[in-house]
């Protein structure tokens, strides 16, 4: 390959943290990302994918190795250096200013281009240019003057994509983006990336979806435990099983979601009758029995996410009733839900499920304060023991239970969120997109945890955008459409086609 065709060359990359080798390539290990190609970067959580991106963006200094950008040595000291060199990123967890407008976030850090001779920002021009970018990307329903914090998760992600593309990058880094958005938005993203590729942009794409890698990528590089394991072209000679086996170091072809054993199912544990919230969902009747996993399927905006939050007290309802173990209950806040033995594993774990700056001890204890305190005095030794036991039980990778969870991979963060509610002994769990942004190995570990909870007799409401996940894990699936239940399906009978026809 002619070196002039390479946009980025990574050689012998290393990044060491205290107690952890996040990247530890051999000196002669090389990844070349060509101009006008989409290059997949895959591996389990903790393999070093996001660390590679953070080095390219100047967020981390590399410990060793060399980087070339368009044939020249490249060693950015900060994000501004990276952007000035033509590199932009769509992050898995974007760092936004929720109190600023969409336009201000799209051009965050680029205020100078909108300042006049007096140093004042031309807000009309900024809003106009932001609108032009949003419209060009197909995000026509997002207004540049809207305060970002009022938008939902998916639209926030679309603003992140707009911000990354606003600089017209020569190299684009995309970190696990499609897992956070609907199928329709993902297809728009694919079209955008293919268009950028055709214009000569080099794209390095992190994904946990092997099907997506096949759909988008020209070549793929595989990381495992910080090491470069393999590089492959995406063609008929490479099978999905080959990629997965290199990712996890073991054969996953026999992995299943859960068994078909329903012997754990008991009496009705949780039920809603005519539950509604104006503008979100209405007249919802569902039942979840003990020892049962019940799924909710639907496309973006179907009302399932708001419904799940309402069951935990994050959203107020204005119609209908809820019952727990046959008794009518009222949930006005998450504290009410917790007191009743109800837990929530949210879709946006970083904003709603974790205190990122703190370690596993505080995060796991946050759902267990009644157990860990007596007469206002906190049992700190008990909190630590609980966290250490959870780290072992759920195979959470962290140097210490005191290290901030922000340093963990997505899969390990998710395990911390799950551990909080399992240790809490919640009898009814609302689980929204539990495997979003986690690798295939962690995915099946999480499925095993959910199956164990089912077998213990806990009731689980599983909200997911992934139909294979719902079909593989659930005893029953309700489909949502435009805020209403549009279908009900039993295990061993439902198929993707049957459910999908009731969702759209």
Image: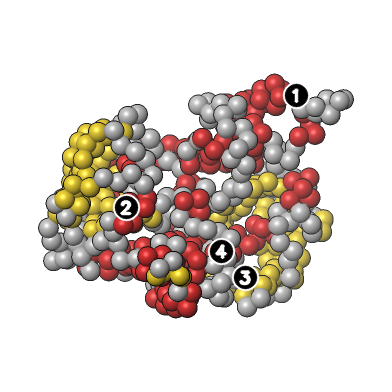
- Rounded to the nearest whole Å, what is the CA distance between mark 2 and mark 1? 47 Å
Dot 1 or dot 3: first in sequence order is 3
Mark 1 — residue? 122
- Rounded to the nearest whole Å, what is the CA distance between mark 3 and mark 4? 20 Å
Mark 3 — residue? 22
Q: Nearer the viewer, residue 386 or 166?
A: 386
Point out the frontmost of discs 2 and 1: 2
Q: From the viewer's perspective, is 263 left or right of 478?
A: left
Q: Secondary structure at mark 4?
A: loop
Point out the frontmost of discs 4 and 2: 2
Q: Which mark is residue 358?
A: 4
Q: Nearer the viewer, residue 318 or 466?
A: 318
Dot 3 or dot 2: first in sequence order is 3
Q: From the viewer's perspective, is 473 left or right of 325?
A: right
- Rounded to the nearest whole Å, what is the CA distance between mark 1 and mark 4? 39 Å
Instruction: Tell me which corner region of the image, top left, top right, bottom left or bottom right, holds residue 164.
Output: top right
Dot 1 or dot 4: first in sequence order is 1
Residue 379, given in percent of the width and then of the height, sits at 45, 74
Instruction: Tell me which corner region of the image, top left, top right, bottom left or bottom right, holds residue 383.
Output: bottom left
- Rounded to the nearest whole Å, what is the CA distance between mark 1 and mark 3? 43 Å
Number of residues whose C-alpha sits closer than 10 Å to that of mark 4, classed few (under 14), some (14–19) or many (20 or more): some
Question: Does the CB distance between marks 4 and 2 fall below 8 Å?
Answer: no
Query: In the image, what residue occupies the spot 27% across and 69% down?
Result: 452
Q: Which mark is residue 337?
A: 2
């Amino acid at each position: 390959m002619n070196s002039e065709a390479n946009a980025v060359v990574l050689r012998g990359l290393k990044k060491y943290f205290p107690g952890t080798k996040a990247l530890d390539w051999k000196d002669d290990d090389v990844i070349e990302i060509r101009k006008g190609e989409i290059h997949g970067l895959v591996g389990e959580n903790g393999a070093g994918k996001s660390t590679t991106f953070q080095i390219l963006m100047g967020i981390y200094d590399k410990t060793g190795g060399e980087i070339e950008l368009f044939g020249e040595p490249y060693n950015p000291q900060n994000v501004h250096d990276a952007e000035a060199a033509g590199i932009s990123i769509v992050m898995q967890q974007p760092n936004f200013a929720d109190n600023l407008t969409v336009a201000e976030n799209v051009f965050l850090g680029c205020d100078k281009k909108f300042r006049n001779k007096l140093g004042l920002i031309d807000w009309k021009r900024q809003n106009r240019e932001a609108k032009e970018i949003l419209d060009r990307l197909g995000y026509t329903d997002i207004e540049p003057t809207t305060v970002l914090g009022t938008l939902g998760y998916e639209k926030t992600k679309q603003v992140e994509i707009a911000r990354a593309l606003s600089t017209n990058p020569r190299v684009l880094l995309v970190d696990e983006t499609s897992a956070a958005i609907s199928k329709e938005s993902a297809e728009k993203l694919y079209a955008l990336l293919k268009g950028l590729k055709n214009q000569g942009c080099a794209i390095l794409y992190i994904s946990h979806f092997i099907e997506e890698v096949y759909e988008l990528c020209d070549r793929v590089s595989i990381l495992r435990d910080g090491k470069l394991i393999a590089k492959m072209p995406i063609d008929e000679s490479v099978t999905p099983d080959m990629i997965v086996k290199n990712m996890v170091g073991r054969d996953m072809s026999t992995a299943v979601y859960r068994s078909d054993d329903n012997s754990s199912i008991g009496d009705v544990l949780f039920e809603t009758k005519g539950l509604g919230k104006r503008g979100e969902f209405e007249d919802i009747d569902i039942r979840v029995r003990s020892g049962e996993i019940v799924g909710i399927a639907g496309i973006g905006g179907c009302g399932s996410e708001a419904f799940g939050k309402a069951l935990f007290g994050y959203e107020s309802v204005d119609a209908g009733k809820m019952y727990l173990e046959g008794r009518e209950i009222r949930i006005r806040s998450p504290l009410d839900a917790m007191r009743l033995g109800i837990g929530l594993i949210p879709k946006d774990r970083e904003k709603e499920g974790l205190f990122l700056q703190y370690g596993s001890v505080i995060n796991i204890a946050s759902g267990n304060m009644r157990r860990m305190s007596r007469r206002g005095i906190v049992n700190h030794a008990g909190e630590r023991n609980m966290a250490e036991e959870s780290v072992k039980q759920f195979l959470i990778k962290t140097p210490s239970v005191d290290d901030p969870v922000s340093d963990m991979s997505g899969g390990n963060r998710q395990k911390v969120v799950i551990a909080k509610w399992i240790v809490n002994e919640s009898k009814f769990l609302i689980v929204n997109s539990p495997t979003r942004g986690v690798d295939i190995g962690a995915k099946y570990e999480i499925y095993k945890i959910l199956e164990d909870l089912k077998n213990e007799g806990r009731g689980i409401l599983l909200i997911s955008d992934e139909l294979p996940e719902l079909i593989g894990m659930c005893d029953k699936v309700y489909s949502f459409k435009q805020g209403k239940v549009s279908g009900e399906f039993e295990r061993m009978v439902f198929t993707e086609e049957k459910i999908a026809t009731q969702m759209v």
